[in-house]
Image: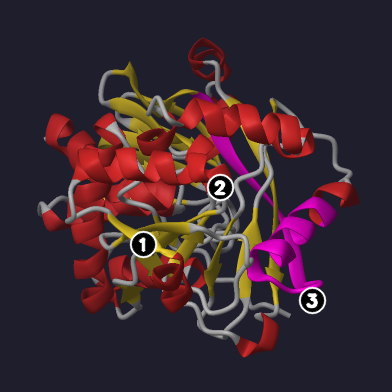
């Protein structure tokens, strides 16, 4: 059995900042506050992080963002590299390989590379892709390499951030549910916590605490089908791998005029991929397995029953991408993240009380940049 953490005593004196939620967004705010010399307490309803922060690819997808998300992602990239050394986890400067299997996909990558420059994107021919991805679909015609992207293991990094905070005197109140928040005070299932300012970082569960805020923001839940599979033939792949379907999901690509023909073609050739909003991609874990995904479905509350056809769809496309007949599944899980019409929810709901959520599935990529911006406005 997993040993549950002992309950931490509630702080007697008011703190400068209370953070509700110990996922990547909440921990990022706590880290930024500590670095600014503030006293902090974190309250988390579970015994350890179990949500989107540990169910993701560990792909710090800096380059494919656009606008404010790109600004936050570039800042977060530097914070991840610094924290890796400080907190004792691995952040690999491995980049991302985007593979193209059709000329229209190469056209998107060419337009992207022209706009961003060689520091952010380098075009590859077939042999260049093969150097990054030894096992691959023979239909690949080329691709691009995005050198700024990172990879971390979220199952290692998130606990490491919590431990780093605890070592600096930050109480993390695990297994403590927050019942209500008002200026200067949060009522929890274990008693009251007083703080000058509060950041509520509960991801897709904003509606559990503040339903009116969630409704006004149009916040819903995005459910993902994800799998951990054995690497065929023990292949080693350094960078994260994106595909033509990824060009339709990340704003840095999807906003380009060349992306629309890709969407139209895939919609005609394989409409089931568009219907399931597939983003075919993978990263390699430290143990060599591949994290493969993913599909996207949106609802305020999802039915508890998983459709095996979604897993079969991802496995079919993953095997094709890697040029093998089939893939062996080690683990499978349902990811869930907050979704809204913008990348970020950042709203003051009372004096000194902020609700902050990444609402586009890029929490690992942007949280540290977002947290720095929020702390700038709070302090």
Find out whether residue 324 is within the magenta segment: yes
Q: Position of residue 49 (x, y in %)?
A: 54, 59
Find out whether residue 11 is within the magenta segment: no
| Quadrant placement of the C terminus | top left
Judging by the rendered image, the residue that carries numbered circle 3 is 328
Q: Position of residue 197 (x, y in %)?
A: 25, 34
Q: Secondary structure at mark 2?
A: loop
Tag in front: 1 or 3 = 1
Judging by the rendered image, the residue that carries numbered circle 1 is 124
Q: Residue at x 25, y 52 (%)?
A: 76
Judging by the rendered image, the residue that carries numbered circle 2 is 102
Q: Secondary structure at mark 3?
A: loop
Tag in front: 3 or 2 = 2
Q: CA distance from mark 1 to mark 3?
A: 29 Å
Q: Secondary structure at mark 1?
A: strand
| Quadrant placement of the N terminus | bottom right
Q: Position of residue 368 (x, y in %)?
A: 28, 50
Whether residue 4 appears in this view of the structure is yes
Mark on residue 76?
none
Viewer-nearest residue: 314 or 226: 314
Q: Residue at x 50, y 74 (%)?
A: 133
The mark that comes first in sequence, 1 or 2, is 2
| Local crowd size for mark 1, using a 10 Å CA cut-off: few (<14), some (14–19), many (≥20) | many
Stretch in magenta? 312-340
């Amino acid at each position: 059995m997993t040993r549950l953490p002992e309950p931490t005593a509630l702080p007697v004196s008011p703190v400068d900042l209370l953070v509700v939620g110990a996922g990547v967004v909440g921990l990022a705010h706590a880290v930024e506050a500590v670095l600014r010399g503030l006293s902090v307490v974190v309250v988390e309803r579970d015994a350890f992080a179990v949500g989107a922060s540990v169910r993701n690819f560990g792909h710090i997808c800096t380059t494919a963002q656009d606008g404010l998300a790109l600004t936050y992602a570039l800042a977060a990239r530097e914070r991840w590299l610094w924290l890796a050394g400080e907190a004792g986890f691995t952040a690999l400067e491995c980049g991302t390989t985007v593979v193209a299997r059709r000329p229209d996909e190469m056209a998107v990558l060419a337009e992207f590379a022209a706009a961003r420059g060689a520091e952010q994107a380098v075009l590859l021919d077939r042999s260049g892709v093969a150097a990054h991805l030894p096992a691959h679909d023979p239909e690949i015609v080329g691709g691009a390499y995005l050198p700024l992207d990172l990879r971390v293991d979220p199952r290692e990094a998130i606990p490491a951030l919590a431990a780093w905070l605890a070592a600096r005197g930050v109480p993390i109140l695990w297994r403590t549910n927050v019942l209500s928040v008002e200026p200067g005070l949060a009522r929890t299932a274990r008693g009251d916590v007083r703080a000058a300012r509060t950041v509520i970082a509960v991801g897709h569960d904003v509606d559990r605490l503040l339903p009116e805020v969630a409704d006004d923001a149009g916040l819903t839940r995005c459910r993902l089908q994800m799998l951990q599979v054995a690497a065929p033939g023990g292949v080693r792949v350094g960078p994260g791998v994106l595909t033509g379907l990824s060009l339709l999901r990340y704003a840095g690509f999807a906003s380009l005029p060349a992306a629309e023909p890709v969407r139209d073609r895939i919609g005609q050739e394989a409409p089931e991929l568009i219907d399931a909003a597939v983003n075919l991609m993978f990263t390699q874990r430290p143990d060599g397995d591949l994290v493969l995904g993913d599909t996207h479905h949106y609802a305020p509350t999802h039915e508890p029953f998983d459709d095996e056809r979604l897993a079969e769809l991802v496995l079919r496309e993953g095997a094709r991408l890697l040029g093998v007949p089939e893939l062996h599944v080690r683990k499978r899980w349902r990811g869930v993240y907050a979704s809204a019409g913008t990348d970020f929810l950042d709203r003051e709901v009372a004096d000194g009380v902020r609700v902050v959520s990444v609402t586009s599935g890029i929490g690992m990529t942007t949280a540290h940049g977002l947290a720095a911006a929020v702390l700038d406005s709070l302090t």
